[in-house]
Amino acid sequence: MLIRYKKEGDGKNRIVAKVYGPDEHKIDNKGIDKDALWVVKKLNGNGFEAYIVGGAVRDLLIKQIPKDFDIATNATPRQIQKLFWNARIIGKRFKLVHLFFRDNIIEVSTFRSGSSEFSKLYGSVDQDAKRRDFTLNGLYYEPIKRQLIDFHEALEDISKKTIRSILPLPDSFIEDPVRMIRAIKYSATTNFKLQNSIRRSIVKYGKELSKVPASRLTEELLKIFGSSQSERIIKDLLKYNLLIYILPTISLSPNKKQLYESLAKLDKITDDKNENKKIKEGGWNFVMIKALTENLIIFPVEEMSGDLLFKEIYSQIKSIINPITPPNYYVQQATVELLKERNIVVPKSCLSAKKPLDVTLYGQPKQKSKKELESLKRAKKAHRVTPKKRAKTTVQSRYSPD
């Protein structure tokens, strides 16, 4: 193990991180996504720091297959965009970069300083580490040198199977209440225990979730239902009285047993590799909504035409999942499936909503519109390297033409 120091203003050296080698952390680079590895190499080759961060490092350490790979770097979003033809900058105040590959999206973020001043948003890797939520997500892995950088004794927490907050509690949960949901999700997906202070803070500050926009709650819920641990997570959200702020109707429903049975089936689907492939291909995007609502739907006793019945069930689903706001297309698909099970044919005229082009479900890569595809083609053409210039390029794109 190596020690990383930083010189303070008084001239004294302070320990900021421990650096572990491959014999100590035992991360196998074979488990790293090839696109993510290529991105790190290209950033390094152009003079930038770059690390694989977050849940991917955690999963590699506990021998789970990472669902996605995020990268942190000291390159600014504009510098990243200049290096990669397949880059798209997203976000308003703090911008991120999405790199689009054939069947994958790599998210690249610039180190944050922790400052609230816009001109000082970006910082160093040790400043960025202070902005992470929990220690198990606060590790930085450099796959080229195969070094694991630990700023918060995270490796020790992982060995103890403990989830500990990096940011001070309760400030962390007041600043971003969604972290409470994530803490419970991480506990379920890793089988780690929540630190007692986290448990107490969740109970005390759960009401802060009422201030979170519906779009963010929807995003977190979609991740939960793609985790293959949704039954356990929903049970824990109920245990800590958080589900009332996410799915109030379902939280107050007496049909919990049937709900858990539906979620168990959903988890089995998402845990099955073949079925999960169908999900990623877009064939099962409605299953979450159906699993949540099928035991609460009340079908009218009197006879109704197919279109009126469709409108009735569709309206009930929207009411049950409120304030969650998934695209109407998937609500329609769930409605169709529920009626199909009862041999009721839905007129095509009822299906007015179009399949969304910019939605990620169950880790499914975002589909790009024709306009975006044309834009990416133009960007790729602009980044082409001539044979003479290619010899001077440190790291060449895997997808650049020969």
Image (cartoon, rainbow, N blue to C red):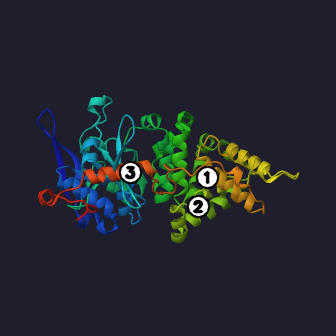
Q: Quadrant of the C terminus?
A: bottom left
What residue is disc 2 on?
Answer: 284
Q: Name the residue located 28 percent from the left edge and 63 percent from the top edge.
A: 25
181 to the left or right of 383: right
Dot placed on the residue nearer the N-terminal end, 1 or 3: 1
The first of marks 1 and 2 along the sequence is 2
Residue 63 in the image, given as x and y percentages of width and height: 39, 66
Image coordinates of residue 180 in percent, x first then y, are 50, 43
Residue depicted at 17% across the width and 57% down the height: 386
C-alpha span from label 1 to label 2:
9 Å
Tell me which amino acid carries mark 3: Glu
The label on residue 374 is: 3
Give the mark toward the camera: 1 or 3: 3
Comparing 42 with 222, the one in front is 42
Residue 238 visible in this rendered orientation of the protein: no
- Label 1 neighbour load within 10 Å: few <14, some 14-19, many 20+: many
